[in-house]
Every structure is written in structure tokens, then in C-alpha cells.
Image (cartoon, helix red, strand yellow):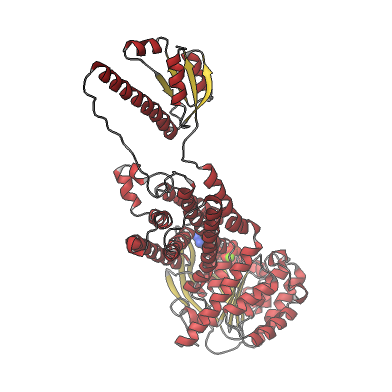
Amino acid sequence: MAAPGGEPALEARGLVRRFGATTALDGLGLAVRPGELYGLVGPDGAGKTTAIRALAGLIDLDGGEARVLGLDPIREGRAVRERLGLMPQQFSLYRDLSVMENLRFFGRVYCLPRAAFRERSERLLQLTRLAPFADRRADALSGGMYKKLALACALLHRPEVLILDEPTNGVDPVSRRELWALLHEFVHGGMAVLISTPYMDEAERCDRVGLAHRGRLLDEGAPLELLARSGAATFEELFVARIREAG
Amino acid sequence: MSGAPGGLRTALVQLLAVVRKEIRQTVRDRRVMFLLVVAPLLQTVIFGFAIDFQVDRIPVAVADLDRTEASREHARRLLADGTLRRAADATSAEEADGMLDRNRAAAAVIFPPRFGADLDAGRTARVQVLVDGTDPNQATVAASAVSRYFGEVGQALARERAAAAGRPLPGTIRVTPRIAYNPSLRSAPFMVPGVLVMVLLIITTIVTAMGLSREREMGTLEQVMVTPIRPLVLLLGKLLPFAAIGLFDVLLVLSAGGWIFDLPFRGPLAVLGVATLLYLLVTLSLGLLISTVSRTQQQSFLAGFLVLQPALLLSGVATPIRAMPDWLQAVTLLNPVRWFIEVVRANLLRGADFADLWPRLLILLVLGLALLSAATMRFRKRLQ
Ligand SMILES: Nc1ncnc2c1ncn2[C@@H]1O[C@H](COP(=O)(O)OP(=O)(O)OP(=O)(O)O)[C@@H](O)[C@H]1O
Ligand SMILES: [Mg+2]
């Protein structure tokens, strides 16, 4: 995979965020370029969600800088949100609304013209193979189907930057493969994608990965390069070694 | 796209999207629909009938230990006007006392032996009255009915004696209270506005608070906040449907009050309309404020009741403010519920118009705006 060049679409520099006595982010930094799929890999509590919230302008930072397409996600929030898609880690759609009603709500909130909405929603429903379930309530979907709907909602407005927080968590292997295939398709369309995951084995599906631990990156690079550099056979092995080094 | 007219159009499309979604969710939720539509009707009927401040036909036990013409006659005349009702006869003071204990009577009147003889002989005759003080309102009415009756008897006797002795008649004072606006002292016309105030407060505040904490609890707020919608548009979209339901509830309660309880509509209804809108500003903002201090729907519900209870108790809806200690009376000046109930009662029962009521409406507006700005400020902060 050719490393795409150009300015980063998504950039975090030395992010610091504390919650009381816990330091959730302790200097984390990363950059994602257009057409790149970046994997933020790390165990529970590593600070993945906090970093993503900071990038999306949902929380304040105690230190460091977040940039989306060169804009400040808090001060220039509205401009950022027109061009950013986010899929939160937990359930975040209206459970008592159907698949189609959820899509329609977000379509309206993004002010999509009727024709554009119809065309895009049809295409997304097809891509995610949710079309037969358009009238099903969101809370009656399986884990994998729900994640695909959330992805569809985040993609309706054709964002240039897409952030997904643990999209494959609680999803069966078949749906997981499907989701990754979808993501690769979008990336090849030039989108910058940041994805967080606790699964080490998913690291190799990314263009680049950052190993997150205790609010910092322990290592970063193209997956195969990282393995080759460290001499580890798997990412799990590599991760354990890095954590031991970090103390 | 970001030009003013385009921005306004965008905001309108988004507002409509939120309103439609909110209505769809509300209609789909049976419990909420019940709370919004059936509960106000039930409350009007229940409160109208059950909270009866009018006290009459108080059950009385009579122990006539004298058994003379005089004692029988006074017992009969004491009970004649219907305030008191003969519920039981006792053969001793102890038995009458026991009837109070067993709730068979709320008061006991005991004519001791020699009552008639004392009267005939011109000595002071004694009548003993026992009153159950559990219900102070009823106790007061019973005690005053008895003392009023015997007071009149005493005066009549004094005049008779004076006349018989050839002395000049003592002057007397007669008090004739005239009760304005609600001459028959029916409590329903007084209570229906109270129900209106309570229903609106409970429904709009709690439903708003819970609706917003639901978005937080279910994670949907996070998803909506990464769309370009402005927080204010989101808030308005969530509040408008409930404001509409609140107005609908007002019509519902007033119609029920008019049909079932002959609620008079003496004043201009425009006053009521304006007051209701101002009151909704207060209750919706309060709901919003409550949602910003709660994490879950359950917390919102509890916090709602914690706020609403004192607000209702200190509003004069059920207990008169004049009966409160001075410092509490001062507190009620800051209570929007108080101003709204005063406006509603004055408007409906007394026919008061804008010229009468504008200061109260102004206070409501100020309190509403203060609550709204506090709530939106906190809401913006809590999004972080
Ligand atoms: N709102 C908050 N209040 C208090 N502590 C928080 C808050 N958000 C995160 N934390 C803490 O910050 C640390 C990092 O949390 P974060 O959710 O970013 O981790 P994560 O990598 O997303 O983990 P997970 O795999 O569990 O989602 C954790 O110790 C967490 O408890
Ligand atoms: Mg997380």
C-alpha cells in the first residue's frame, strides 16, 4: 500500500487530559493523512476514546493540540463537523426508531437535499446489506447490523475524515470482515480514517498503527515494518514487549 | 452555506428534524403518552372531588346525660344547620370519648346531668365539647360551630333576663361575613387552577428533564453533538413538542374543570394564555436545568421531584402563603409557581385582566429568563 502524502487530515499533538486523579491522555500524538487507514490499538483504558473525543471536539484538553483538516475542533466546531464522521464506541443511535428513521433523522440534521439523501441512503443500505431491515427498530438489530447502521449514519454526509471507536467490538467474525472491507473501500476513495480497536490481530489490516498504552503511543508505523523492526512474530508479542520496556 | 439566510434555513430544517423525531418517540412511548394526556384528566377529576376544603356534616357523638326537655332541644338545634351531624349517641362521657378514639365521631358534645336544672335556676350551665384535633381544619370548624351556637344562646338568655328584670337591653354585635368571588365556598373552582399548575409543572418539567437525560444516558447526545446542529436548535427542537403538549393539557384541564366543576371563566382568556406561555418557559427551563445535573433518567426523575415538592408546597396552591412564617413567605417571592397560580386564580375566579396582573406576569418572565439562561449555560458546559 502506497503511503499517501500531503498534509495530515487528522492530527493530535501531545494530547493531555486528566479526569480527577486519572491521566487519560499523557502526551499522545498521531497524524492521519487523506487516503490512510490508521489503527489506534490498545487495551481497555489506554485512552483511545478520550483521544477520539478530543479530536471530535467533544471534550476540552488540558494540554496539546487537536486539528481536523487544519481546523480547531472546538473553536471551529461547526466547520469541522460538516466534514467529520464519528461512530462512537457505545450505542449512539435512537433505539426506538427504525433503521430508515435513524438515517432520515441524520440526513435532515446534515441538511441533505431529498434526492441526495435518497440516493446515498439506498447505496449505504445496499453496501451494508441492511436494506431488508429498513423498518426494523435499531434496538432489534444484531451487534454487527447495528454497527453497520451506525457506520451508514456517519457516512451520510460524505465526510472527508471518519473516526470509528472500536467498531468491531462485539461483532461476529463474518460481520467484522465485512466492516473492514467497507472501510478499505472508503479509504481508497481518499477518506482519512482513524479506527480504534482492542484487538491486536486487527492491526495488520491498517496502513499504519499506533500502539496506545496509558495515554501515550509506545510505538507507531506500518504493521509489517513494526513487526520486522522488533523481531516479534505477532502484534500481541510486540505489544507485550513494548509495555515491558515502558515499565 | 454559512450566510445568514442559509444559516437560518439550515437551522429550521434541523429544528424540524428534531421536533419530528421527538414526536415520533413520544407517540411510540405509551407510558409517556399516558403521563401527558390521561394523567392530567384523572388528576383534575380526583383533585376536584377529593380535596374538599368545604367542611360540613362533621360526625358528632352526643352524650345527653341530663335527659331533659332543654338538653334535647339544644342538641337538636345545635345540629340543625348541617355543619354538624349526629353520628352516634353515647350514654356516658367515657363512651363518647371512646367514639372519638375509634373514629366514629370527630367531636363529642356532652350535656352533663343537671344541665336543664342549672339553666332553669339561672346558674351557669356547662356543656362539654371534645374535638378530635387530627384534622385541624375540621376541628376548628366543629369547635367554632359549637361555640357560635352556645354564644347565641347565652346572649338570648342574657337579654331575656335583662328584660325580665326591667334592666336596659345590652347591645349586641352581629358579624355578617360576605364571601366574595366564591360565595358558596366550593373548593373545586379553587382547586382546578391548582391542578393546572401542578400538572403543567410535573409533566413539562419532568418529561423535559428525562427526555434530555435519556439522550445522554443512551449515548445519542454524543452522536448528535458531532453533527453541525447548534445546541440551541437541538434544545428548542426538544422543548417545542412538550410546550405544545403543555398547552394542550391546559385546555384539557380547563375544559374538564368547566364541564364537571362549573369553573367560572371570568377574566380575559388572553391573560391566561400569556401566563401559561411564561409558565412553560419556567417549567421547560427548569427541566433542562435538572437534566444538566443528572446523569440518568432515574436521577432526573428523582431530582425533579426534589425540586417540585417544595416548589408546590411554597406556592399557595394548597396552603395559604399568609399562614407561613415570615422567612418562608419571603422565599415564596422567588417561586414562579406562586405567581402563576395567583394569576390563574385571579383571572378565572375574580376576572382580573392585564392591568391588574402585569406585575406578576413580569416577575414570571424574569424568573423564566433567569432559569433559561442558567440552564443553557450549564447545558453547553455539560456537553464537554
Ligand atoms: N468522563 C470520565 N470521567 C472519569 N474518568 C474517565 C472519563 N473518561 C475516561 N476516563 C478514564 O480515563 C482512562 C482512559 O479511558 P478511555 O475511555 O479513553 O480508554 P479506552 O482506551 O477507550 O478504553 P476502552 O477500551 O475501555 O474503551 C480510563 O482510566 C478511564 O477510566
Ligand atoms: Mg473506549
Percent coordinates x, y for residue A194 in the rendering: 59, 77
Percent coordinates x, y for residue B321 in the rendering: 36, 46
Quadrant of residue A92 in the image?
A: bottom right
Residue under the point 72% across and 70% down? A145
Q: Residue furthest bottom?
A: A6
- Depth check: B146 or B32 in front? B146
Q: Residue furthest left?
A: B168
Percent coordinates x, y for residue B84 in the rendering: 47, 29
Q: In the figure, A106 relative to B63: above or below?
A: below
Residue under the point 47% across and 50% down? B189
Percent coordinates x, y for residue A150 in the rendering: 65, 72
- Depth check: A208 or B359 in front? B359
- Depth check: A162 or A121 in front? A121
- Locate ligand 2 by image quadrant: bottom right
Can residue A48 be seen in this snapshot?
no
Q: In the figure, B96 relative to A10: above or below?
A: above
In this rendering, would A180 be left or right of B345? right
